[in-house]
Amino acid sequence: MNDKTNIIPQTRWITISECGNYEEVEDAIGLTFDLDWACDAVLEDCINLVDEADVPATWFVTHQTPILERLRANKKYELGIHPNFNHLLEGKGSDVESIIDELLTIAPNAKSIRSHSMVQSSRLMDIFLRKGLSYDCNHFVPEQSAIELRPWKLWNGLTKVPHFWEDDATCIYQKNTPIKELACRKGLKIFDFHPIHVFLNTENIERYETTKYIHSDGNALLEHRYTGIGTRTHLLELMRFFK
Ligand SMILES: [Zn+2]
């Protein structure tokens, strides 16, 4: 038996705004969640799991809901923003600044941003900075690349914080490294989860796609939760093992 999995490593859990001092976040683990307009039942379920594990997390908010009070009340949590610029790319919607401004009224203390679909550009990054944001989380460098990650500073002073694991990407990649092995890797280890995938325990994107019509109905959705190894079990394993 490979006893690498039996050694419980010393783990430092961090939130995104702790990534300004690179040396201090070396080898740390960061949990992040893109809320993606999930309904309250789905958000509540996810928050319950993380509350119970009592680990720090960064939550990228997409919309106003009373559930956010629970996140604001927990000192281990931090709110970032998760704007959707996709409509602009399709020639619809308003403008970048109003989209960011609206989210900043929901999370006025936000220092970090990850765009929906990771939309980014140098012009956007200048706007992020002007809006008072300091951390851009729009770089996904998959764990499969085996690149040791760390945050870096951009020309304008914005700090880039890359993530190496994303629940939906894990469903698509043919080969994924087991969570316990990943969390023992060198370098900064930021995980990106989505509450809807946590709720469904998504193991295959089809599960997500075919249940879209009931994504706002927690009870109906519960019947479609996968019972094998999926996003939910990955999250629980990560939080329990590395606590
Ligand atoms: Zn998103």
Image (tube, grey):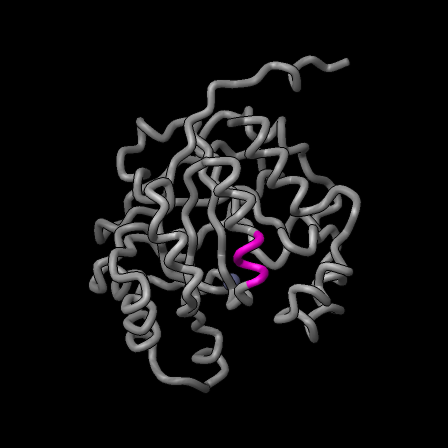
Residue 216 point in image, percent of width and height: 61, 71
- Which image quadrant is residue 150 in? top left
| Horizontal side, residue 11 vs residue 241: left or right | left
Task: Quadrant for the N terminus, please.
Answer: top right
Residue 69 point in image, percent of width and height: 37, 58
Tell me which residue sits at (28%, 44%) in the image: 153
- Magenta stretch contains residue 91: no
Range of residues picked out in magenta: 41-45
Judging depth in this view, the residue of 85 and 18 nearest the camera is 18
Residue 243 point in image, percent of width and height: 51, 27
Judging depth in this view, the residue of 174 and 15 nearest the camera is 15
| Horizontal side, residue 239 vs residue 111: left or right | right
| Horizontal side, residue 192 vs residue 227: left or right | left
Give the prevailing secondary structure in the magenta stretch: helix
| Horizontal side, residue 213 vs residue 113: left or right | right
Tell me which residue sits at (79%, 47%) in the image: 227
